[in-house]
Amino acid sequence: MNGLINTFFRRRISNALFATLVALSLLFLLQSQRQHLKYDSFTSGYLLIAAVLFLAAYNLRKKLSFLPMGKSSTWLQVHIYVAYVAIVIFLAHVGFRFPNGQLESLLAILFSGTAVSGIYGLYITRVYPKRLSNLSEEFVFERIPAFQYQVRKQASSLAVASMEQVQQTTLAEFYSNRLSDFFEQQRGVVYRLFPGSRRRKKLMAELSSLQRYLSTEERQISNQFFRLIRKKDDLDYHWALQGKLKLWLFAHIGLTYSLVLVAIYHAVMAHAFHGGLR
C-alpha cells in the first residue's frame, strides 16, 4: 500500500514538474519573441485559445464516455495541468496586470472566474465525496426531498403515537418545542454554505438528558427519534454538499463556454485591428 501511495505521489510530482517546465519554456519563447519585436501576444493568444478549447472538451468527453477516448481519470489529470499552464500563459498575455479595455477586462474576468472555480472544484470534488462516503447511507440528490418528506411524516406520527401508546405528553412536547422545526424546515443559507452536525448533536444531547425521566416504553420511542434525527441530518448534509457540487459544475461549465466565445471574438477583433491573419 505504501509503495502504491509513493508511486502515486511521485507520478503527480513528475507531472507537475513537467507542466512547470512547459510553462517556463513557453514564457521563454514569448520573451524571445518580444525581444525580437514580434507579436508575442498573438502566440500567447493562440496558445490560450487552444488550451481553453481543450479544457472545454473535457466536459464533452464525460458526455461521450461510451467512445474509446481514454480514461476519464487521465483526462482529468491532463485537464488540471493544461489549466495550470494556461494560467501562466494568460498572465504573460496580459502582461501580469489587469487589462484596461472593456473587452480585455471582460475576458480577464471570465478567465479568472473560470480558473478560480476550477481550483475550488478541484478541492470539493476531492473532499466532499469522501465526507459523504463516511455517512451511513447514500442518497440520490433528486430523491432527497422525497426522503426528507418521509422522515418528517415519520417523526410527526411518532410524536402522536407517543401520546396514544403511553398516555404521556413528554415526548410530544419535546417534539413540538425542539424537533418540529428541525424536521419540517429546510436548512438556512449558512448551513448550506458550511454544513455541519452541531444542531444534530445538540438535539440528541437534549433528548439523551430527557431519557432519564422517561418510562421504558417512552425510551423505546425516543430511540426511534434518535434514528430519525440522524437520518434527517444525513439527508440535509447530502443535500448541501451534493447541491454545491452541482452548482459548482453548472457555474464552471457556463464560465468555460462563455470564455471560449469571448476569447474567439477577442482573437478575431485583434486580427482585424492588426491587418488580418498573420
Image (cartoon, rainbow, N blue to C red):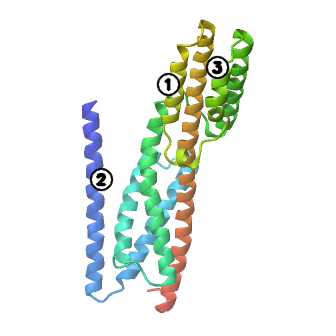
Examine the image and state in which quarter residue 164 appears. top right
**Residue in view at x 28 percent, y 36 percent:** 5
Q: Quadrant of the N terminus?
A: top left
Amino acid marked by disc 1: Ala
Nearer to us: label 3 or label 2 = 3
Which disc is residue 15 wearing? 2
* Mark 3 nearby-residue class (10 Å; few <14, some 14–19, many ≥20): many
Q: In the shown orientation, is residue 44 left or right of residue 37?
A: right
The CA span between labels 1 and 2 is 49 Å
* Mark 1 nearby-residue class (10 Å; few <14, some 14–19, many ≥20): few
- Compare marks 1 and 2 and give the one earlier in the sequence: 2
**Residue in view at x 58 percent, y 40 percent:** 239
**Disc 1, SS:** helix
Residue 265, how many percent across, how many down?
55, 78
Q: Is residue 221 visible?
A: yes
Q: Is residue 197 visible?
A: no
Which disc is residue 171 wearing? 3
**Disc 2, SS:** helix
Q: In the shown orientation, is residue 88 left or right of residue 239?
A: left
Amino acid marked by disc 2: Asn
Is residue 138 placed above or below 270 in the rendered structure?
above
- Compare marks 1 and 3 and give the one earlier in the sequence: 3
Residue 15, how many percent across, how many down?
30, 53
Count of numbered circles in the view: 3
Residue 130, how many percent across, how many down?
44, 36
Which disc is residue 218 wearing? none
Is residue 184 placed above or below 36 in the rendered structure?
above
Mark 3 touches mark 2? (CB < 8 Å):
no
Q: Quadrant of the C terminus?
A: bottom left
Which disc is residue 205 wearing? 1
